[in-house]
Amino acid sequence: MKKIKNKKKNNLFKKIFIKICRILGFEIIDQSNLSSPTLGKDLNEMLSIQGEKSITIPLGKIDIKKKVQSLKIIVRTCTSELIMDQNKRRIFDCEKNEYTFRTLRSIVKASNKAKEKFENINFELVVTDTNSPENDLKIFKEILKGSVIKNEILSINLSEFKHKIKDGYSKAKFSNMANFYNSLLIAKNEEADIIYFVEDDYLHSINSIVEMILSYEKFYSIFLQDLVLLPSDYPYLYSKTENTKIYLGEKYHWRLISESLVTFMTSSRLIKKNFEELKKMGIEWEDPWEKPLHEIYKTHPCLSPMPSLAVHCANINSIFGVSPFVNIKKLWDENEN
């Protein structure tokens, strides 16, 4: 009986100690069963609390300096061109609309998952379209019916950009520039604090947006400035010998890089601050087209995940396409109709 009483006393003391730690904001780890009594979670679960603290075992806690309160996802679509100004075929050898449909399905799944995790974040999904056939737009609408967040489809009037974009570009290139220009205008007038610009050929893993939100908060708290996150681990990043740095996000490693394509997440404040420079991408095409973004990365960190959170469905031989060490076929099949 004496042993039982001691056990009860120990359990009572443990409960009181856990409550005190919670009140003081301390986290404790029970390494005998790999759990956190203060959080009530196993260590392999998501330990971070969105907007409050980022927790990484065994490195401890980082207090969040910038809470993500709202996220606007802008997906730029055009199903009438397979690959802009190229005759190459894409991985899986489908028509362009199939990549767009699966991209949109994957974004809906990922944003639904994020909304489930972060009920207090205001999410919005906007599809900005140029030149997609009416039947494809109807399928867009059907896919968006599965979204639990506010959403809409905007068909861009290209005639509004004829006097803004320089002459001499192909129809596909003009359409792409106008769509990006339009997404910048949306971001410039947006109250959401975070904007996610997405091209229509990126298959997202279901946890991609959750990881990006938590990692954005963590990295902002480390760098203490606005930054840019990519969803993809591009092959061309491994063809260079430049120095880099590796950081721990929520569940992924993230690599500091100096170049990107045009699918990225950042703050609306950074877009507004650099609007005139970014607008050049919507006015004139200069190689590399992403140069204004690359200039921003000289003063603001840009990071990409390892392994990839989203796969760019380009030609299999493109160094700007398929990410390494990802089960691409599984991701493709998961987003079939």
Image (cartoon, grey):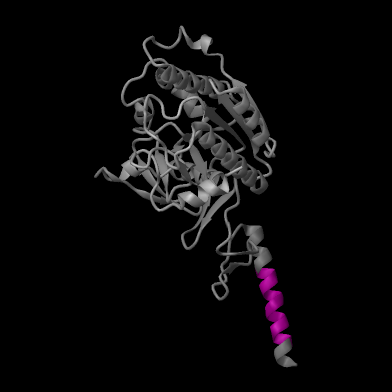
Q: Residue at x 44, y 47 (%)?
A: 308
- Give coordinates of residue 22: x percent, y percent: 65, 60
Q: Looking at the picture, how far across and down is residue 29, in whole percent?
A: 56, 68
Question: The C terminus lies in which quarter of the figure?
Answer: top right
* Image location (x, y in percent) of residue 173: 41, 20
Q: State the quadrant of the N terminus.
A: bottom right
**Would you say the magenta stretch is mainly helix, strand or loop?**
helix
Q: Residue furthest bottom?
A: 1
In the rendered image of this protein, does residue 25 appear above or below residue 76? below
Front one among 241 and 49: 241
Q: Which residues are magenta?
A: 5-17
Residue 144: image quadrant is top right
Q: Which residue sits furthest left?
A: 241
Q: Nearer the viewer, residue 313 or 196?
A: 313
Q: Residue at image x 51%, y 52%?
A: 330
Q: Say left or right for 140 vs 199.
A: right
For this view, does 295 lie left or right of residue 208?
left
Does the magenta portion include 255?
A: no
